[in-house]
Image (cartoon, rainbow, N blue to C red):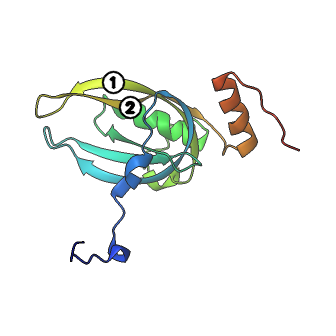
Amino acid sequence: MSNIKINLTEAVEPEGNGGLYLKESGDYIMRIDSFKEGQSEVKGTQFLEFTLKTNKGQIHSERFYTVPTALWKLKRLAESALKREISVSDVAFDPETLLDKWVEVNLVSEEYTNKDGEQKTKLKINDMREADKPNEDEEIDKLADKIGGERVDPF
């Protein structure tokens, strides 16, 4: 028996809840949970990193770069979340307006080479659409369709 004493009540949960990250490609209805501003290490490009969560707590984080050639993706997220087109009068975009909004995202698997030269795979948003908060019955039906089963009412 070890003499090491560890106080587990002081444990700090990992950012993003560790193992709850989505790992499979597919369509997900997700709530925009949070965002942070950042800058890429290589080119110094500014970005907004949004964290999206399913109603079961599964997480996906994605960076949206703020250079003109990449702004289309952030614009699509905003239009999907706000359920309206972004117009010329929307010159002062505030990312906080997207928090707690629901979107449907299509995630695809993409291979990349990390800075150590290793081949890795990550999920990336391929497309976004408007969505409402899902109710549990719809999710159960969707899961039953996915696995080829039929929903059975236990009562």
The tag earlier along the polypeptide, 1 or 2, is 1
Q: Quadrant of residue 136?
A: top right
Residue 6 lies, in percent from the top left, at: 27, 75
Quarter of the figure that contains the C terminus: top right
Residue under label 2:
123
Drawn side of residue 64 relative to residue 136, left or right: left
Q: Quadrant of residue 30?
A: top right
Element marked by disc 2: strand
Residue 86 lies, in percent from the top left, at: 52, 37
**Residue 53 in sight from this viewpoint:** yes
What residue sits 56% from the left and 53% below the top? 100
Return the residue nearer the eye: 45 or 17. 17
Circle 2 Cα neighbour tier, 10 Å, few/some/many (<14 / 14–19 / ≥20): many
Residue under label 1:
110
Drawn side of residue 68 relative to residue 90, left or right: left
What residue sits 24% from the left and 72% below the top? 1
Residue type highlighted by circle 1: Glu
Q: Are marks 1 and 2 in contact (CB under 8 Å)?
A: yes
Circle 1 Cα neighbour tier, 10 Å, few/some/many (<14 / 14–19 / ≥20): few
**Residue 94 in sight from this viewpoint:** no
Q: Residue furthest right?
A: 155
